Image (tube, grey):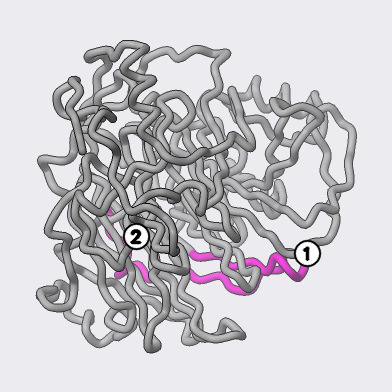
């Protein structure tokens, strides 16, 4: 996940052209929360000041990467904001974010959003508490300490699945692994108790491993028959965890690898190269007791999929890399640009975040071709580097984090909003596109006069 080359600059688009680009999107994503810099619920102003002075808290180094929401009933919790007052939150809505420790000065890697009196006064309460997120300067207790979390997943039973990569300062030359990667599962319906802690065997973790994403496949009403699929983005592997038997195995497959010619990215004038493999994961609907896991590498513009019954067959992968032909599948056509994360609706609509600051969709009833992929939202201001996304009920929840600025030494505007949680209704986003198969809706691509940016040439091309 560390870029091996970056620079700033490039062509500029006129205001008029940018406005035309935004008009190509069909739907709306509203900003639910935003931050200029991240701040936490320190016990008092003095504790916060001490953390800043000791460099244990460097606000500009804390990046919000992922989001998920628990929409079941929850008990009220007592929080202390950094001004020292307390408030009792008894809301049924609990929103969580990850803040991976990619740079020094991050006091917590996973947190719950605590809204303040104003939209710009949103604080983060370390989850499940401060103690679990505090890294000792002496000996780290790897069993009880959360080191660094890139992404997480809340399943429909209220289980909170968190993958701790165990690595600090991932974006620095001093990056180091201080604990083995582990999986933590909390019960949000029962006082956040720990259901399971699982350490991945050393044989399944490479020196370059980074477990960046997780998808959870629940197959029975009690949740005992559940599998988690975990992307090892930099070792180009997929790890499968079997909850029932409390074991895991590695799926080694060439389809998880990046494409070297797609490792170059350009976002808002920042150029960087990132040779990241499998990252996007999305589960399709269950059909005949099986379902597809859709996936793609970050440095790629293709989509792939595999039946989950194949992934759950541990014996297939005991001898390393297998011939995936006829088992793993790759799209014949491509996206316009690279994609980070993706999600899929119960009806089989894939929604994917693109590196041109947009959302796209594709209905899995159709072939994956340019004719059947659609831009459904775009904002060069609000949606720079979309990095996390979930479907909660009938809504898409997404994070944009301007991560490209952390690959460089460029100075950003200290007063500008950098991190956003955006929310939009699925039906509103996909309406009037071919992704929406409901009766009476129009199957159409953008009209001929809609212009879209060619990401490789800094010029506009017509589509239609």
Q: Is residue 338 above or below residue 266?
A: below
276 and 54: which one is in front? 276
Please tell me which residue is depicted at 44% across the width and 64% down the height of the picture. 439
> x and y percent of residue 453 in the render?
24, 27
Marks 2 and 1, how far apart in space?
30 Å
Range drawn in magenta: 183-208
Residue count near mark 1 (Cα–Cα under 10 Å), binned few <14, some 14–19, many ≥20: some
74 and 191: which one is in front? 74
Give yes or no for residue 188 being in the magenta stretch.
yes
Residue 299 as seen in the image, left or right of residue 167:
left
Query: Which image quadrant is residue 193 in?
Result: bottom right
The numbered disc on residue 88 is none
Which residue matches tag 1?
73
Please tell me which residue is depicted at 47% across the width and 68% down the height of the picture. 346
Helix, strand or loop at mark 2: strand
Helix, strand or loop at mark 1: loop
Which quadrant holds the N terminus? top left
Q: Count every numbered label the image shows and give the total.
A: 2
């Amino acid at each position: 996940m560390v870029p091996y080359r970056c620079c700033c600059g490039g062509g500029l688009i006129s205001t008029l052209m940018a406005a035309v680009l935004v008009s190509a999107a069909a739907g709306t994503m509203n900003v639910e929360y935003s931050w200029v810099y991240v701040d936490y619920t320190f016990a008092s102003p003095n504790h916060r000041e001490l953390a800043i002075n000791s460099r244990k808290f460097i606000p500009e180094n804390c990046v919000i990467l992922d989001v998920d929401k628990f929409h079941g009933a929850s008990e009220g919790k007592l929080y202390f904001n950094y001004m020292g007052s307390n408030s009792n939150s008894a809301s049924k809505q609990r929103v969580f974010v990850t803040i991976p420790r990619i740079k020094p000065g991050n006091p917590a890697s996973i947190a719950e959003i605590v809204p303040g009196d104003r939209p710009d006064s949103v604080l983060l309460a370390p989850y499940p508490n401060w103690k679990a997120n505090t890294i000792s300067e002496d000996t780290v207790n790897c069993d009880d300490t959360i080191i660094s979390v890139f992404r997480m997943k809340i399943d429909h039973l209220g289980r909170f699945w968190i993958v701790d990569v165990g690595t600090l300062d991932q974006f620095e030359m001093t990056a180091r692994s201080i604990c083995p990667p582990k999986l933590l599962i909390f019960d949000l319906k029962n006082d956040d108790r720990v259901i399971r802690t699982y350490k991945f065997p050393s044989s399944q973790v490479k020196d370059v491993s980074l477990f960046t994403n997780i998808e959870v496949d629940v197959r029975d009403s009690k949740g005992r028959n559940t599998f988690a699929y975990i992307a090892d983005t930099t070792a180009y592997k997929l790890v499968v965890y079997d909850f029932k038997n409390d074991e895991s195995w590695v799926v080694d497959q060439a389809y998880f690898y990046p494409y070297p010619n797609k490792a170059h990215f350009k976002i808002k004038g920042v150029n960087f190269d990132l040779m990241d493999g499998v990252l996007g994961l999305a589960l399709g609907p269950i059909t005949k007791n099986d379902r597809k896991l859709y996936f793609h590498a970050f440095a790629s513009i293709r989509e792939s999929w595999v039946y989950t019954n194949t992934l759950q067959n541990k014996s297939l992968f005991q001898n390393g890399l297998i011939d995936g032909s006829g088992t793993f599948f790759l799209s014949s056509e491509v996206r316009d640009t690279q994609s980070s994360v993706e999600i899929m609706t119960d009806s089989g609509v894939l929604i994917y975040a693109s590196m041109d600051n947009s959302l796209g969709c594709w209905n899995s009833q159709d072939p994956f071709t340019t004719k059947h992929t659609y831009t459904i939202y775009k904002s060069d201001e609000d949606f720079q580097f979309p990095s996390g996304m979930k479907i909660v009920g009938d809504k898409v929840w997404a994070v944009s984090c301007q991560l490209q600025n952390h690959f460089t030494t460029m100075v950003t505007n200290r007063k500008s909003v950098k991190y956003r949680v955006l929310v939009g209704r699925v039906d509103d986003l996909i309406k009037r596109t071919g992704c929406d198969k409901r009766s009476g809706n129009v199957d159409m691509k953008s009209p001929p006069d809609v212009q879209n940016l060619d990401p490789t040439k800094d010029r506009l091309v017509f589509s239609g």
